[in-house]
Image (cartoon, rainbow, N blue to C red):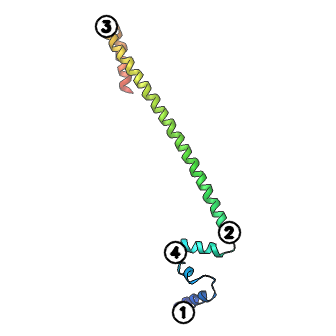
């Protein structure tokens, strides 16, 4: 039955293969079996070249994606810095308005408005 067919198949493989005993022992590992295939198959150079081309294309795509992400991060940093500078400027104006309000009651409204703007930011 099936056991005999498998045994015959193994015997036939052993008798007819160009693989060494060591190579046949590595066929259970898919990655190693693929490497053995590449070494023995006359078309392997084309297949290897095709795989290599795909890997290079994928690497190029990942590098482009990484560059875009890097640019977006830099833009975000710049925007954050602009916001921080604007907030500092508003705080300075608020201090100036509060100082003016301490001397001039008419400037009190400006200080209150600036305080509201800062609180909402």
4 or 2: tag closer to the N-terminus:
4
1 or 4: tag closer to the N-terminus:
1
Rate crowding at label 3 as few (under 14), some (14 to 19) or many (20 or more) other CA atoms within 10 Å: few
3 or 2: tag closer to the N-terminus:
2
Circle 2 is placed at which residue position? 45
Q: Which mark is residue 29?
A: 4
**Image label count:** 4
Front label number (3 vs 2): 2
Circle 3 is placed at which residue position? 103
Task: Give 92 or 106, whichever is nearer the viewer.
Answer: 92
Task: Give 41 or 68, whichever is nearer the viewer.
Answer: 41
Front label number (3 vs 1): 3
Q: Which mark is residue 4?
A: 1
Q: Is residue 4 placed above or below 63 in the rendered structure?
A: below
Circles 4 and 2: CB distance less than 8 Å? Answer: no
**What distance separates the C-alpha of mark 1 from that of mark 4?**
24 Å
2 or 1: tag closer to the N-terminus:
1
Point 69% across, 74% down: residue: 42
Q: Is residue 77 placed above or below 39 in the rendered structure?
A: above
**What distance separates the C-alpha of mark 3 from that of mark 2?**
87 Å
């Amino acid at each position: 039955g099936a056991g005999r067919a498998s045994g015959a198949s193994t015997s036939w493989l052993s008798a007819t293969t160009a693989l060494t005993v060591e190579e046949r022992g590595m066929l259970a590992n898919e990655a190693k079996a693929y490497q053995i295939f590449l070494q023995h198959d006359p078309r392997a150079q084309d297949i290897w070249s095709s795989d290599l081309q795909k890997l290079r294309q994928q690497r190029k795509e990942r590098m482009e994606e990484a560059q875009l992400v890097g640019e977006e991060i830099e833009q975000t940093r710049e925007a954050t810095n602009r916001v921080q500078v604007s907030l500092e400027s508003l705080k300075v104006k608020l201090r100036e308005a509060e100082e003016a309000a301490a001397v001039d009651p008419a400037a009190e409204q400006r200080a209150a408005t600036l305080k509201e703007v800062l609180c909402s930011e």
